[in-house]
Image: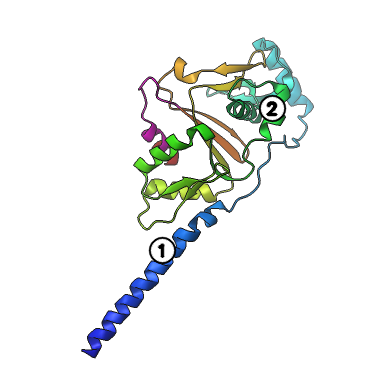
Amino acid sequence: MIKKIVIGLSILIIISIIFFIVFHQNQNGSEEQISSLPVTYEEENEEEVNEQTQEQITQIIENQGLKADENIYEIATEYDGREVVVIKPNIQYQVALAGMLKKDKPEFSEINDLLEQAPNHTGIWIEEESREKFLAILKNITNAEYQINEEGFLIQNATWNSNKYDKQIKQMLSDEMLHIFTIHSVTYIVDEVTGEIQEYPFEEMDPYTEYEYFASDDKEMFIINTNSYEKVDQEEILKNIFE
């Protein structure tokens, strides 16, 4: 009889310990996920382009008939080995982000002011108008519970039955990058020929486009198709991103 009581008490103690650990993780899991590093939108001091490379950029610009400031370009290599000039990724990223924040086409003169409203540390940040929809999609493809804090950053509550998407999200929350998500049909880009900022209605142009992607150093942004034309599956889009 005493043996049974001891065994019963031992089981209760073990259950209590497990419950305490799980409860503690759920209470503090959010705080752990918020640990972050600052990000900056200031243009990093790039090494001066050597004279030979600058001459090459100038020559390609002339050959391609481009009319924009040559300082916004860098050299890229096509699949066939041909060298071309493209708009620097950090410029495209800043323009797309500024347009998202303004909800309209930005001007170069206002980009720095707009970027002062941008998230300033690593983690997963959701654009304000996309947050409800984003959480709804996550609920359908993950096992963990999620919320978005006042700053707009995603928080993952601890769970014992995480699936592969939960695990990937957890990794993104703890890596040294800022991941921005928005659900929209339009973005803004710098035209390769003129160097001017243009509206790019990617969903209207191709309803099957899952998302537009921009990246710069420790920052990346996903602009998810709104599925207005019912040609894509937003759940599958996020699954593919998180895989």
Where is residue 135 drawn, in percent x and y? 43, 40
- On screen, residue 37 versus residue 157, left or right, reads right
Does any portion of residue 56 appear in the rendered image?
Answer: no
Which callout, 2 or 1, points at the residue further toward the start of the chain?
A: 1
Q: Quadrant of residue 216?
A: top right
Q: Which residue is mark 1?
A: 22
Residue 47 in magenta? no
Where is residue 125 drawn, in percent x and y? 54, 40
Does any portion of residue 49 appear in the rendered image?
Answer: yes
Residue 237 in magenta? yes
Whether 112 is drawn above or below 68: the answer is: below
Callout 1, which amino acid? Val
Callout 2, which amino acid? Ile
Image mark for residue 111: 2
The Cα–Cα distance between marks 2 and 1, rounded to whole angstroms, is 45 Å
Start-end of magenta stretch: 225-238
- On screen, residue 240 versus residue 128, left or right, reads left
Q: Residue furthest left?
A: 1
